Amino acid sequence: MKGIGKYFIFLSRLFVKREPLKTYMKQIIDECVKIGIDSLVIVAIVSTFIGAVTCIQTAYNMVSPLIPDYVISVVVRDMTLLELAPTITAIVFAGKVGSNIAGELGTMKITEQIDALEVMGINSVSFLGLPKIVGAVFMFPMLVILAGFLAIMGGYFAGTLTGVITPQDYIYGLRADFIEFNVTFAMIKSVVFAFLVASISSYKGYSTSGGALEVGHASTSAVTNSCIAILTADYLLAELLL
């Protein structure tokens, strides 16, 4: 509970005595590149193979001849939008981006760079943490959109190339009984997950004390706590919005 209280105090400091917004523009753009562009490859690989595996395993479990083949792509579509694209991408995001944020801020903390900012009268929490959070919230939904598209395409290629479903049935299943709110739900989850990962990782890095060993501990703790927060938020959002 003590750590949770310190986390909320950290969040409150993000918006108190911050610098003018124009001060953050270059930092936000740099963070968008670092957080979004540099994560494209890993997100593309993971999402494509997850979609392919979901398609093949769904086809494997459809043993009844009474179930039409297009149900395979219905399952791939709904699983991708509701869970796989936002949540699995967020777990990967926490491992790559979260550990990087915690390590960067932890290194600045133990080398007293953050103390130097405070001496100059700069709100170091806002100056260092806010661009990372804004960059994550802006870029992560785009990664989720990409992940959803590639997962569905991965399922298409895996299903059609192996012969478990025809291209016509797959496309028909993608359109059948489509619920538009599922896309909105995925976007809401992506924004919440991005904020949690960036803010928790920033807090863990900013709270580092000691030496190089503690920086490693902070990175590990950031990823672990981010994953727990993602899964908790995933359940709560499902309860509240579905």
Image (cartoon, grey):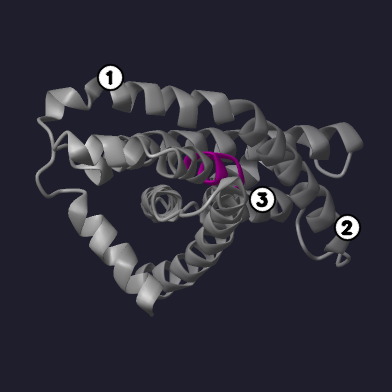
User: Can see residue 85?
Assistant: no
Disc 2 crowd rating (10 Å Cα; few below 14, some 14-19, many 20+) is: few
Q: Position of residue 70 (x, y in %)?
A: 71, 50
Q: Position of residue 115 (x, y in %)?
A: 30, 42
Disc 1 crowd rating (10 Å Cα; few below 14, some 14-19, many 20+) is: few
Please, is residue 143 above or below residue 224 in the view? above
Among the two numbered marks 1 and 3 on one chain, the one whose residue lies closer to the N terminus: 1
Which amino acid type is shown beneath numbered disc 2?
A: Tyr
Give the SS element for disc 3: helix
Please state the extent of the stretch shown in magenta in the rendering: 95-101
Which amino acid type is shown beneath numbered disc 1?
A: Lys
Question: Left of 240 or right of it: where is 172?
Answer: right
User: Can see residue 126?
Assistant: yes
Disc 3 crowd rating (10 Å Cα; few below 14, some 14-19, many 20+) is: many
Quarter containing the N terminus: bottom left
Give the SS element for disc 2: helix
The residue tagged 1 is: 26
Question: Left of 1 or right of it: where is 15?
Answer: left
Which amino acid type is shown beneath numbered disc 3?
A: Val
Question: Left of 3 or right of it: where is 11?
Answer: left
The residue tagged 2 is: 60
